[in-house]
Image: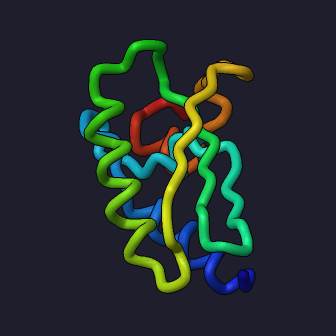
């Protein structure tokens, strides 16, 4: 798979907004790693701001829909981790500013 496909996946993830904060999950620092296998399986390692976040199903469905729209992606596997735990420092400066944290 090409790095172009991986770039397109990352661009799609940038458009997935946290349903409560309306900020990209990428800018929030929730996406830890994205890989793509030769057979087109996108693997996304991510976290949530809190364990047991009730909105994960909504976020997961939007991730799947948007990443599967990328040419060359055959499936999406989302792995949820809390190691390391999310913290505000993982956010981009613009996301922190938007929330008034800087």
- The residue depicted at 62 percent of the width and 26 percent of the height is 81
69 lies above or below 101: below
Q: Position of residue 63 (x, y in %)?
A: 40, 54
17 lies above or below 7: above
Classify residue 44 as left or right of residue 71: right
- The residue depicted at 26 percent of the width and 40 percent of the height is 58
Looking at the image, the residue that sits furthest to the front is: 39
Q: Position of residue 4 (x, y in %)?
A: 66, 86
The quarter in which the C terminus is drawn is top right
- The residue depicted at 54 percent of the width and 49 percent of the height is 77
Q: Foreground residue, 95 or 3? A: 3
Q: Foreground residue, 37 or 47? A: 37
Q: Foreground residue, 91 or 41? A: 41
Q: Position of residue 86 (x, y in %)?
A: 61, 24
Classify residue 92 as left or right of residue 22: right
Residue 72 placement: quadrant: bottom right
The quarter in which the N terminus is drawn is bottom right
Count of numbered marks: 0
Classify residue 9 as left or right of residue 1: left
Render colour scheme: rainbow
Residue 19 placement: quadrant: top left
- The residue depicted at 49 percent of the width and 63 percent of the height is 75
Q: Position of residue 71 (x, y in %)?
A: 48, 85
Looking at the image, the residue that sits furthest to the top is: 51
């Amino acid at each position: 798979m090409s790095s172009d496909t991986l770039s397109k996946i990352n661009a799609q993830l940038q458009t997935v907004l946290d349903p409560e904060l309306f900020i990209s999950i990428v800018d929030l620092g929730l996406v830890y790693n994205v890989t793509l296998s030769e057979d087109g399986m996108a693997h996304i390692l991510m976290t949530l701001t809190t364990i047991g976040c009730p909105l994960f199903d909504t976020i997961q469905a939007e991730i799947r829909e948007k990443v599967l729209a990328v040419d060359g992606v055959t499936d999406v596997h989302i792995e949820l981790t809390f190691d390391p735990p999310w913290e505000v420092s993982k956010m981009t400066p613009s996301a922190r500013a938007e929330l008034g944290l800087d």
